[in-house]
Amino acid sequence: MTIRLVLADDHPIVLDGLENLFSLEPDFRVLAHCVNGEECVEAVRRYQPDVLILDIRMPVKDGLAVLRELHREKQPTKVVLLAGALEEEEVLEALRLGVRGMVLKELAPQMVIQCVRKVHAGERWLEKQAFGRALETLLRREGGEREAGGVLTPREIEMVGMVARGFRNKEMSERMGISEGTVKIHLHNIYRKLKVENRVELILYAQAKHLV
C-alpha cells in the first residue's frame, strides 16, 4: 500500500531532505511540498494525503494554526508534527487537535520514516526525547493496569475530560459551579491518584483510557 504524503516546512533544505528520504522508500509518494501554512492547508484540501508532515514553525500560518483549521474542517489526514523543540503548551494543544506523531528534527532520519509508518497504521508515536516523563507515564499504563473508574470519582473523571478538551481552571470553575481554589484541590487529588505530574501527562492518560 502506498502512503501518500504532503510535506510542509519553511526551510528548502529540510524539504529537499525529506523528499529525498521518502523517495528512497518504495511505499511512499510525496504529493506536494509547502513552505508556509496557507499552502499547507490548500494542499491538504486538494490532495487529501494519508499523512501530513508539518513543521510547527511556519510563516503565514504556524503549525498550530494549520492544525486548528484542519481540525475545524474535520480533515481525515493524519498529522506528524516536526519541530526543533516543543513547549509544554504546544504539546497540549497539538494533542487536543488530534496529532498522532511528534518528532524532533535532531533525530535520525530513519526515525521519521518509522513514525510516519506507525501513524499511518493508526498507532501513536510520541518521541521520548520530546516528552520525557509524559511518555514514560503513558507507557507504564499500557495494558490497562489502572482503570480510571477504579481510581477516580465520577466528578474527577468529568474534570479529567474537561482538562483533555482544553478547559482552563477558570472555565472549569464556572462550568461546575465551584471556586478556582476548589478546582485546584480536585486537580491535585487527581494528579496524586493517577501519579501524573502535569496537564500533559493527564491528557495522555485521558486519551489512553478513552475518556475523551
Image (cartoon, rainbow, N blue to C red):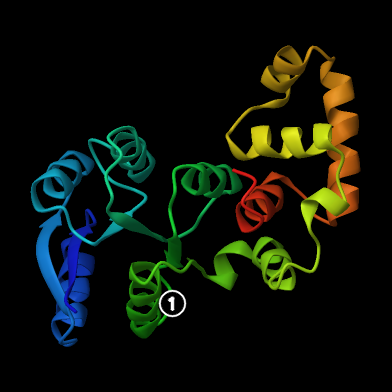
Seen in the image, is 47 located left or right of residue 166?
A: left
Seen in the image, is 196 located left or right of residue 71?
A: right
- Tell me the residue at 58%/35% (across/down): 165
Seen in the image, is 48 located left or right of residue 81?
A: left
The residue that label 1 is drawn on is 107
Quarter occupied by residue 166: top right
- Residue 135 position (above or below residue 167): below
Q: Looking at the figure, which quarter contains the C terminus?
A: top right
The image shows residue 55 at horizontal and vertical percentages of: 32, 55
The image shows residue 202 at horizontal and vertical percentages of: 71, 49
- Residue 7 position (above or below residue 66): below
- Tell me the residue at 23%/42% (across/down): 37
Residue type, mark 1 in image: Leu
Seen in the image, is 31 located left or right of residue 66?
A: left
- Tell me the residue at 27%/44% (across/down): 75
The image shows residue 186 at horizontal and vertical percentages of: 87, 33
- Residue 148 position (above or below residue 112): above
Q: Looking at the figure, which quarter contains the N terminus?
A: bottom left
